[in-house]
Amino acid sequence: MELEYETAQSTGMPCFCYVAPPGAAIDQDMARFRTQLMQKAVEFLSTPTELYGDLLLKLREFKPRVFISYSSKDQQFVDQLTTRLKESGQRVWLNTESIPKAEHWHNEMVSGLLETDILVLVLSADSTASKWVREEWKTFQEMGKTILPVLHRECKVPRSIQKLQVVKTTEPDWYYKLLKAVEQRL
């Protein structure tokens, strides 16, 4: 239990403690650990069911919220965008980072689409020609989720995407417009 607490503390995860019912035996090590624990900001829950439910709720806060759909030919721009979004506190799903090695990439992409709330669609001639990018944004459309198009390089924008407000990277404050749109929809 102490090791779990220290690991949670070092990674910045929320820490929990199950409080035993009155009269339950507590050994010296547990008493020392509780004293140490009480010095930190910790939530106390009264039942294992509450602990489990609250832990699941807290873990959901760590899931990626923004899926980035793009052509690999725009990788350099996407890497910079991902870094900026993360620095702004956004949790990003990006195929090059979010798919574990040796996993079936298509299944992982589908999971990423299902788990996230917003799709940032990086528009370029390469991405609009990609069947995978098209599949990603169409899947998001079918689920009724938010798509935020970012025009990275001039291209023919698909008709159903034309109806959406597009953030153009040629504008000096484009990133802040994108970040504001992301934050308004989360």
Image: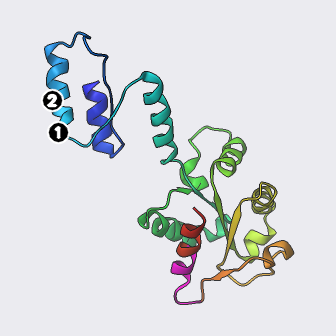
Q: Residue at x 28, y 39 (%)?
A: 42
- Residue positioned 41% across, 66% down in the render: 87
Asked if marks 2 and 1 touch (Cβ < 8 Å), the reply is yes
Q: Position of residue 33 (x, y in %)?
A: 18, 26
Considering depth in this image, is 138 or 156 the residue closer to the camera? 138
Q: Nearer the viewer, residue 59 or 21?
A: 21
Provide residue 82's location: percent of width, then percent of height.
Answer: 52, 65
Dot 2: element: helix
Q: CA distance from mark 2 to mark 1?
A: 7 Å
Q: Which residues are magenta?
A: 171-178
Say left or right for 43 vs 38.
right
Circle 1 residue:
39
| Residue 36 within the segment the image draws in magenta | no
Callout 2, which amino acid? Answer: Thr
Secondary structure found at label 1: loop
Q: Is residue 174 left or right of residue 125?
A: left
User: Image point 50% across, 40% down: which residue?
Assistant: 57
Residue 132 image offset from top left, x and y in percent: 77, 58
Q: Residue at x 31, y 23 (%)?
A: 19
Query: Residue 172 lies in magenta, yes or no?
Result: yes
Q: Based on the displayed image, in which of its 4 quarters is residue 139 positioned?
A: bottom right
Residue projecting furthest to the right: 159
List the residue tagged with mark 2.
Answer: 35
